[in-house]
Image (cartoon, helix red, strand yellow):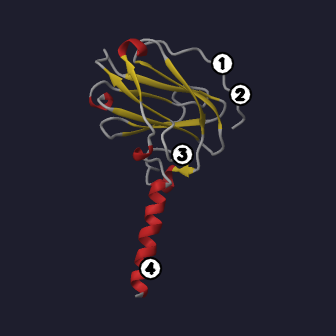
Amino acid sequence: MRIFALSLFGALACGTTAVACPALNMSTGATTYDAGQLAGAQTVSLTAGGENRLEQCGLGNLGFGQFRSAPDHSFVVSGALPGGVTLAVNSGCDAAMLVNTADGQWHFNDDGNGNLDPRIDIPAGAALNGQVDVWIGTFAGGDCAATLSIVQEGAALPMMPPSTGDM
């Protein structure tokens, strides 16, 4: 009986851990963008941060950062694009980005957009053929204001003032 109780406790503990990590089933809906909209940057204001450390979620091989369980933004691209999509963040701290593309692949970036902000280029094709989930976290914890820009690959990103965070 003791072994059964310990096994049950272990199974429940593992189940709880999985829910506390970035999870695909927690999206609350997706915004649809067409090629015309993405010819110019679409911006989303949000708060970077989260309580879940990637290494505690089995995603530490991607990078380091803290993210919420639910995606910060989910989107679907309708129609064909001439190329891929660029996701870039401007924030008031050292932000990080985690993306799960429509083909189920995980992508991570920490400083690709400069100024301690992330940037990820998603190729055309299967990666954009369905819902894309985006999490904006922070490298070392805490929260800060952030803006996510989504634009067709090669199109101009909006000019943002430099971040003023102290992280």
Q: CA distance from mark 4 to mark 3?
A: 29 Å
Q: Does residue 95 lie above or below 158 as drawn?
A: below
Disc 1: which residue: 161
Residue occupying image coordinates x 48% and y 40%: 71
Residue 93, position in %: x, y? 65, 34
Disc 3: which residue: 68
Instruction: Looking at the image, tell me whether mark 1 or mark 3 is earlier in sequence order.
Output: 3
Look at the numbered disc 1 and give the secondary structure of its residue.
loop
Residue mark closest to the camera, 1 vs 3: 3
Disc 2: which residue: 164
Q: Amino acid at mark 4?
A: Leu
Q: Amino acid at mark 3?
A: Arg
Quarter holding the N terminus is bottom left
Quarter holding the C terminus is top right
Instruction: Looking at the image, tell me whether mark 4 or mark 3 is earlier in sequence order.
Output: 4
* Pointers 4 and 3 in contact (C-beta within 8 Å): no
Instruction: Looking at the image, tell me whether mark 4 or mark 2 is earlier in sequence order.
Output: 4
Disc 4: which residue: 6
* Pointers 2 and 1 in contact (C-beta within 8 Å): yes
Instruction: Looking at the image, tell me whether mark 4 or mark 1 is earlier in sequence order.
Output: 4
Quadrant of residue 24 within the rendered picture = top left
Q: Does residue 125 lie above or below 69 as drawn?
A: above
Viewer-nearest residue: 140 or 134: 134
Residue 31, position in %: x, y? 43, 27
In the rendered view, does 117 fall on the left or right side of 16? Answer: right
